């Protein structure tokens, strides 16, 4: 069968739900060779992060240039910093047949859905809000005002779940990873995604016989 276009996979959900942990676990084994879309951000680098691996850490001015040049699939301002998804690599990888994996917050995910509705949109939900709050506090990198702001935002974001295709509850990381992989692999088998290729094969086969 000829190479088909890759899938655009968007993993999203409220801050503190564990998107980064689930994504890291998926890429640690990366059984299915997904390509991670590295975002650009204006926030400061945290300990242990690497420029060009975790994010492209850039200035506000550089970020605004990317917006002007229309180089971003989406961008959002989140707790005072810009975050955005560079579009070029995504298009190249999808065309080459690779599944491209985005891990972004909810506003951005909904913008991606407007531009690329054929993507697979997965909402990562917390088991409950108390657990979410303790995960936000447990990070130890944010002060109280930011925690409060993030909980308010989480509430609004959880209401956006209805616009997604799937929900995975992040109770156990390993289970969440398995469920995300299962969703992506099942999406590849959807009739709409394979019908053209199969029709083409049938067409070629019978043409040869004529
Ligand atoms: P953090 O600063 O903790 O790394 O990320 C804050 C939030 O920004 C997380 O919810 C993360 O998923 C989200 N994020 C990371 N990259 C992007 C991006 O390119 N676009 C958008 N809209 N959100 C992003």
Image: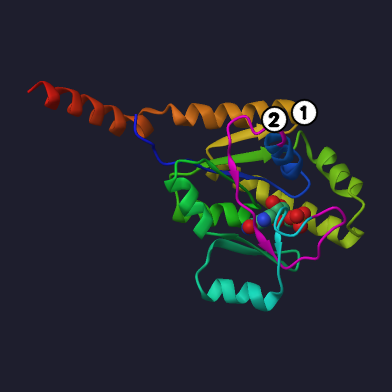
Image marks 1 and 2: residues in contact by CB distance under 8 Å: yes
Task: Report the image quarter containing ligand 1.
Answer: bottom right
- x and y percentages locating residue 102 in the rendered image: 60, 48
Between 148 and 70, the residue placed more toward the observer is 70
Q: What's the residue at 71%, 74% (across, down)? A: 59
- x and y percentages locating residue 192 in the rendered image: 35, 33
| Quarter assignment of residue 170 | top right
Q: Say above or below: 37 vs 168.
A: below
Q: Which residue is mark 1?
A: 172
Write the start and end of the magenta stretch as one range.
28-49
Q: What's the residue at 75%, 50% (across, down)? A: 15
| Quarter assignment of residue 183 | top right
Q: Is mark 1 within 8 Å of ligand 1?
A: no
The secondary structure type at the circle numbered 1 is: loop
- x and y percentages locating residue 155 in the rendered image: 72, 49
Query: Which mark identifies residue 176?
Result: 2
Q: What's the residue at 46%, 46% (across, down)? A: 94
For the residues marked 1 and 2, what is the alpha-carbon distance in whole angstroms? 6 Å
Instruction: Look at the image and tell me whether residue 152 can be seen.
Output: no
The secondary structure type at the circle numbered 2 is: helix
Direction front: furthest residue: 208
């Amino acid at each position: 069968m000829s190479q088909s276009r890759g899938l655009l996979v968007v993993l999203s959900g409220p801050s503190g739900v564990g998107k980064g942990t689930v994504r890291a676990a998926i890429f640690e084994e990366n059984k299915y060779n997904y390509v991670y879309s590295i975002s650009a951000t204006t926030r400061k680098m945290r300990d242990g992060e690497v420029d060009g691996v975790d994010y492209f850490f850039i200035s506000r001015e550089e970020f605004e240039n990317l917006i002007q040049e229309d180089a971003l699939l989406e961008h959002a301002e989140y707790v005072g910093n810009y975050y955005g998804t560079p579009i070029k690599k995504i298009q190249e990888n999808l065309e080459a047949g690779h599944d491209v994996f985005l891990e972004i917050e909810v506003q951005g995910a909904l913008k991606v859905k407007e531009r690329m509705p054929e993507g697979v949109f997965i909402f990562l939900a917390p088991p409950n809000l108390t657990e979410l709050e303790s995960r936000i506090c447990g990070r130890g990198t944010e002060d109280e005002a930011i925690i409060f702001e993030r909980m308010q935002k989480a509430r609004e974001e959880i209401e956006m779940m209805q616009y997604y295709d799937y929900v995975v509850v992040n109770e156990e990381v390993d289970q969440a990873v398995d469920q995300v992989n299962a969703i992506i692999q099942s999406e590849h088998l959807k009739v709409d995604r394979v019908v053209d290729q199969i029709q083409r094969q049938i067409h070629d086969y019978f043409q040869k016989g004529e």
